[in-house]
Image (cartoon, helix red, strand yellow):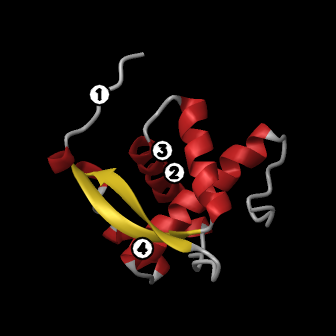
């Protein structure tokens, strides 16, 4: 599989507060899928758009630290999720990413409940 690394001008930076476990989970799913993190986050946003009416926005954990996450410019507009969930950009990105990662790990473990707070 050929992977193309995007140039810096093609990526947009976002600051999102993640716990160490959440950050490690993002790296793990990226490695499992043989994708860059920005590709996994783009997939998470696509998944969230398909399920946006079923999702409530999450809040950042108090023990997290702000991390830089990158998205391709073509995926960097998600005002539809912000509007549906009545939240700010970083919360929409956090919600989509974390719920998608939870689903991926829960499916790998044979569980379907995304609200499991094992993170």
**Position in image of residue 85 (x %, y %):** 48, 77
Residue contact between numbered discs 4 and 2, judged by CB atoms under 8 Å: no
**Position in image of residue 98 (x %, y %):** 59, 61
Distance, label 4 to label 2, CA atoms, is 17 Å
Pointer 3: what residue? 40
Distance, label 2 to label 3, CA atoms, is 10 Å
Pointer 1: what residue? 4
Q: Is residue 39 left or right of residue 61?
A: left
- Mark 4 or mark 2: whose residue is earlier in sequence: 2
Q: 88 and 82: which one is in front?
A: 88
Q: Secondary structure at mark 1?
A: loop
Pointer 2: what residue? 47
- Mark 2 or mark 3: whose residue is earlier in sequence: 3
Q: Nearer the viewer, mark 2 or mark 3?
A: 3
Q: Quadrant of the N terminus?
A: top left
Q: Which mark is residue 115?
A: none
Q: 21 and 50: which one is in front?
A: 21
Q: Nearer the viewer, mark 4 or mark 2?
A: 4
Q: Residue at x 32, y 71 (%)?
A: 79
- Mark 4 or mark 1: whose residue is earlier in sequence: 1
Mark 1 packing: few (<14 Cα in 10 Å), some, or many (20+)?
few
Q: Nearer the viewer, mark 1 or mark 3?
A: 1
Pointer 4: what residue? 90
- Mark 1 or mark 3: whose residue is earlier in sequence: 1
Distance, label 1 to label 3, CA atoms, is 14 Å
- Mark 4 or mark 3: whose residue is earlier in sequence: 3
| 52 over 5 or under it: above or below | below
């Amino acid at each position: 599989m050929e992977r193309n690394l995007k140039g810096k001008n093609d990526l947009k930076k976002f600051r999102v507060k993640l716990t160490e476990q959440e950050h490690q989970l993002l790296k793990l799913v990226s490695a499992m899928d043989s994708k860059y993190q920005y590709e996994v986050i783009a997939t998470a946003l696509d998944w969230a758009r398909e399920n946006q009416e079923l999702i409530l926005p999450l809040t950042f954990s108090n023990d997290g630290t702000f991390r830089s996450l990158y998205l391709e410019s073509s995926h960097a507009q998600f005002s539809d999720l912000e509007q549906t969930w009545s939240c700010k950009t970083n919360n929409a990105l956090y919600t989509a990413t974390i719920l998608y990662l939870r689903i991926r790990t829960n499916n790998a473990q044979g569980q379907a409940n995304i609200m499991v707070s094992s993170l």
